[in-house]
Each structure stands twice: as C-alpha cells, then as structure tokens.
Image (spheres, rainbow, N blue to C red):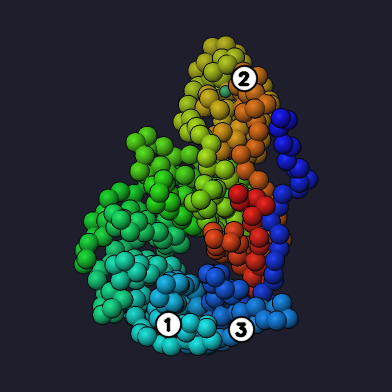
Amino acid sequence: MAAEIQPKPLTRKPILLQRVEGSQEVVNMAVIVPKEEGVISVSEDRTVRVWLKRDSGQYWPSIYQVMPAPCSCMSFNPETRRLSIGLDNGTIAEFILSEDYNKMTPVKNYQAHQSRVTMILFVLELEWVLSTGQDKQFAWHCSESGQRLGGYRTSAVASGLQFDVETRHVFIGDQSGQVTILKLEQDSCTLVTTFRGHTGGVTALCWDPVQRVLFSGSSDHSVIMWDIGGRKGTAIELQGHNDKVQALSYAQHTRQLISCGGDGGIVVWNMDVERQETPEWLDSDSCQKCDQPFFWNFKQMWDSKKIGLRQHHCRKCGKAVCGKCSSKRSSIPLMGFEFEVRVCDSCHEAITDEERAPTATFHDSKHNIVHVHFDATRGWLLTSGTDKVIKLWDMTPVVS
Ligand SMILES: [Zn+2]
Ligand SMILES: [Zn+2]
C-alpha cells in the first residue's frame, strides 16, 4: 500500500484569535484562565481586570478592580483561584476569585518589599509566596499565616524567578546578568551557586522540572539553556532574536521553547534536537589559519614586516582567525545560531545543508512583547505588548 501523503500547509504560523484592549497603560502581566475563555490582567494603570468572552465575541471585564498603586506582576493559582498581585509600592495583595470569575474577595496583604515587586510565585504545595523586588530582595512568606519566612539580597534587581517544588531550589535572574540558585528551607536559605553567561541583564527565566533545564532570556538578544540536572552541565546559547528577549515559556508536551522579543518576534525552538555547546574563543597572536599576525602582535609584525590584522573568531571551532580566512557566513542551528554568523573557511566547507536546516520557526506578533503566558492544554499563547494590547494566539499550527 502506498504511503499516505499528508497535505502540507503552505505556511504554518500562529493564528490571532483575539485582541483584548482597554487598558490605559501597559499590561505588565496577564494569564489565560484555564477552561474558560477568559484573561486575568494586571496593569500599570493600577487595575486588575478579569476579561470574559461575551456573546458578541469580544472580551469584556467582569471584574475591574482599582488598586492603590500600579500593578507590576501577578501569580494565579487555578486550583484555589488565588490571585497574588505585586504592587509598585512593595505590597503583595492577595484575592480569591469566585468560581464564575465575576467577583474577587480580598484575603490579605503582605508588606513584602520596600519598593516595586518585580516577580511573584505562589507555591501551593508549600503554601509559600516567593517574591523579588526593586529593593534587591528575594523574600518568601507563608501564605497561611502571612508571615515572612526569610529573605536574600540579590546582586541586582531580579527580573526572573522560578522554583523547583521537588528540591526547593529557587532560581533568580537579575539585571546584572547573573542567575542565583538558592536552596530554601522553611525559614532559611543557602546559596547553592551563581552563574553568568549573558553580556546583558537577565529578563526572563523558565524552568522545565522534567528535563531539569533552565532557560534564561537576556537583553543581549540571546537565550541560554542551562542543563542544571544533566550530568554534562552544558550551557547552550540560542541566537534567534534581533532585539531584547523579554519573555519565555516552555511547552513541555512538545518540548518546544517559546521566546518573545522586544522586536515583536515569537521564536518557537525545537528542543528535541541535540545541540552543541559553543566553543570557548581561543586567543592567539596570529591567525590560526594563515599565521598572519593580529595588529597587537608588535614583535612578530616587526620580524615579518607585515601589517597586523584584526582578530575574529569562528563561531563553530572557536579559532582566532583573520577576516580573510573567515569571509563566509553560515547559520549553525545545531549550535543555536539560527542567523548567519562568522565561520572560518574550513568550517564553512564542512557544514552540510542538513546541519543548516533551521530548528526554530520565526513569527511576528506585531507588538513589542513585555510578557507571555502559554496555555498548554489548548495551545494558546497570550502576548502583552507596550501598545497596551493583549493578544491571544492559537499556537497549534507551530507548537505540535
Ligand atoms: Zn572554524
Ligand atoms: Zn588568516
């Protein structure tokens, strides 16, 4: 029997389902309400809104709550419908949403920080509220008693916060580019390690508890995949954005990473492929291909009476090469370079077309994304932009 030929769609891209508009200022965070056609948003305009889809097909607020300060972040737990909101004044305000999402009841306030709360995570299993603030503090509170359990001073303002429930490790990414790993106890914490791989600040973190991999996005345009739980301890760089990476989300069931940038780009990375670590850049006084000295090698220049050349690095082998020996460019998707980068002539010859096949897809959201949320059950992606608009996308054409 002949093999069945699947019709191949011409373009596979996210489908825009809905624009949710009406916020006066940027929506700093928002989530898709599971099993409902609804969105919960917190905005710089001080409002908390729950938007539900109406018969007209449009999303209208069923809850419109004005807070005493701009709302910087939130954490929503669907099982308990507990909504924790971080405010610009350092307070975390906690509410319970009614089953029909038409009412929110205040539960308690935490005086968590001296200034703007930057990230919140509610951990139901431990009844903990983890948070970071502009005051460079990481803090955790008991959500039952409301008591502060402990804190840790970070090296810079944190903009990424993730937690591994099983081992109680917290990952904090900050604006200096550092990622700090702490092990939390009930009322104390120990510093496990810090690591640094970005040349810009960390803007987002995403933890995959199954593969035990941490993704960090940065203003340096790159994403790094840190193999925390693996034995190899590799760090793989993913280069697919032309602007700051602003938000990350991981689709566990398909092993795809979604990264979003300030340029509106949505990149969907296939993480099921084995990628190689980028080589350390080697230092050399002369080109490692043709032996021409680089311009700071005064002695050899004097001896050979040659004009020095600028040092470049081949992204594939890491060798220091002159411009003449690295005139060609290539993408190297299996090393995370979806865009063309400098390679030496011998590496250029060695790269096969197969190796050049992209391992990511690129899409344009047409707004400057500040935050994303992915609903894995329906394959929906929420993007929030600096244009004050929330967009809902059907990602099933690309996340599958
Ligand atoms: Zn090379
Ligand atoms: Zn050369």
Q: Is residue 211 left or right of residue 70?
A: left
Q: Which residue is mark 2?
A: 350
Within-10-Å neighbours for mark 3: few <14, some 14–19, many 20+: many
Within-10-Å neighbours for mark 1: few <14, some 14–19, many 20+: some
**In the structure shown, which secondary structural element does the residue marked by tag 2 occupy?**
helix
Which is nearer the eye, 127 or 318? 127
How far separated are the C-alphas under marks 3 and 2?
57 Å
Numbered tag placed on residue 149 in the rendering: none
Q: Are marks 1 and 3 in contact (CB under 8 Å)?
A: no
Q: Is residue 285 left or right of residue 188?
A: right
Please, which residue is most extreme toward the front here? 1
Q: Are marks 1 and 2 in contact (CB under 8 Å)?
A: no
Q: Quadrant of ligand 1?
A: top right
Q: Which residue is mark 1?
A: 96
- Taking the spot 50% from the left edge, 58% from the top edge, the residue there is 203
Q: Give whichever of discs 1 and 3 has the lower sequence position.
A: 3
Q: Which residue is mark 3?
A: 61
**In the structure shown, which secondary structural element does the residue marked by tag 3 occupy?**
strand
Q: Give whichever of discs 3 and 2 has the lower sequence position.
A: 3
Regarding residue 359, the answer to whether it shows in the image is yes
How far separated are the C-alphas under marks 1 and 2?
59 Å
